[in-house]
Image (cartoon, rainbow, N blue to C red):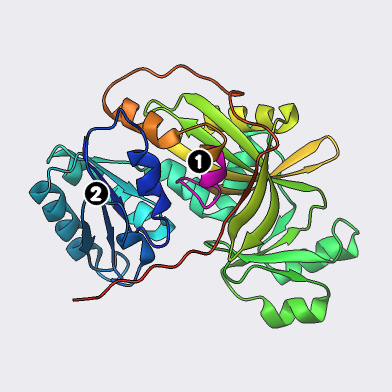
Amino acid sequence: MNILITNIGRRGYLVDFIKENADFKGKVFVSDCDNTASGLYGTNDGFFILPKPVENEILYVKSLINVCKQNNIDAVLPVIDPEIYILSNYRSNFSEEGIKVIVSDRRVLDICFNKIKMNEFLEHIGVLYPKTYDTIQNFKSALEQGVIEFPVILKPIYGSGSIETCIVKDIRQLELLFHDGMIIQQRISGIEYGCDIFNTFEGKTIRCVIKKKIAMRSGETDKSITVKNENVKKVALYLGKKLGHIANLDCDMIEEGENVYVIDLNPRFGGGYPATHLSGVNLLSILIKLLEGKDVEPEYDDYKENLLVMKDISLKSVVLD
């Protein structure tokens, strides 16, 4: 079983996590569109510089398929949002070559990447989410009626990495920062959690690891503590069943009293995954077992609790050709 992790960026630790499994006998390759991406230089079995997916998706897909065929790659694991959305359109092209692309179908991705569609889905299945407005006029009406109050959260409908996401304290600041393609959301005061909700290729949830967020950096979890929380787990397992994604879902929730609000869905291995892995749940090994056609039984509580996981800064240097 040979794996290619695409647009690896700074997540070279994913290669290490796969290779630390003594039962894994294959190779792990990586790619990126930037030859200075640190994840290219580590314990992988080879790396490739490919075109940017968002600039020419047809060229990118063609180049990626060629790399897979030349290196006997069985599965492609993308880890950034724009590429995941693109590759979902070409799964059949890869499948014809015997290559499995680890992305959910477009129904799932449309829900995850569009905050308005996400809220509509959550409303439909009865899961709480922050009050949301897509125009200043609608927000002002709610403000006058006392339905919502400042401060509020301003974010893009299609967002990644917390780009343009900010706290807004008054109407003047809101009118200055708001533009088409953004939403205004109620600010929930509570404890924020990140959950890794892992499904089989048939959409059955088999793992769930909950982490209390301590610090964020550029939209990515920087410090977290693994916890057991039945209230959050109940929502996570229900969400995994109803969404029907494949492989990992990085889900953000806020618990306020007895209420649990879902604020973000990321259908991939997210920045909070290292805490899940270090707590004893190797989702990458489970993914490989599923790719090999093996059965994996559900287990939701078999991980270390109260484990503080912190990301550190390490240095790499290479001589570029």
Residue type at mark 1: give it. Answer: Leu
Tags 1 and 2 touching, CB below 8 Å? no
State the quadrant of the N terminus: top left
Q: Which part of the image, by quadrant, shows the C terminus?
A: bottom left
Residue to which mark 2 is pinned: 90
Specify start and end residues of the magenta stretch as a single range. 266-276
Q: Please give the name of the residue rendered at 62% of the width and 33% of the height, measured from the top-left corner.
A: 236
Q: Secondary structure at mark 2?
A: helix
Give how far across and how far down residue 155 sits, in percent. Answer: 63, 65
**Relative to the observer, which residue lies in front, 241 or 3?**
3
Q: Is residue 161 above or below residue 3?
A: below
Mark 2 Cα within 10 Å, few/some/many (few <14, many 20+)?
some
Crowding at dot 1, Cα within 10 Å, few <14 / some 14-19 / many 20+, comes out as many
Q: Verify whether residue 10 appears in magenta.
A: no
**SS at mark 1?**
strand
User: Disc number at residue 69?
Assistant: none
Regarding residue 284, the answer to whether it shows in the image is yes
* N-terminal-most mark, 1 or 2: 2
Question: Which residue is the site of mark 1?
Answer: 249
Where residue 23 sits in the image (x, y, percent)? 30, 27
State left or right for residue 185 relative to residue 67.
right
Task: State how far apart marks 1 and 2 are (Cα).
Answer: 21 Å
Q: Is residue 31 above or below residue 18?
A: below
Q: Nearer the viewer, residue 319 or 6?
A: 319
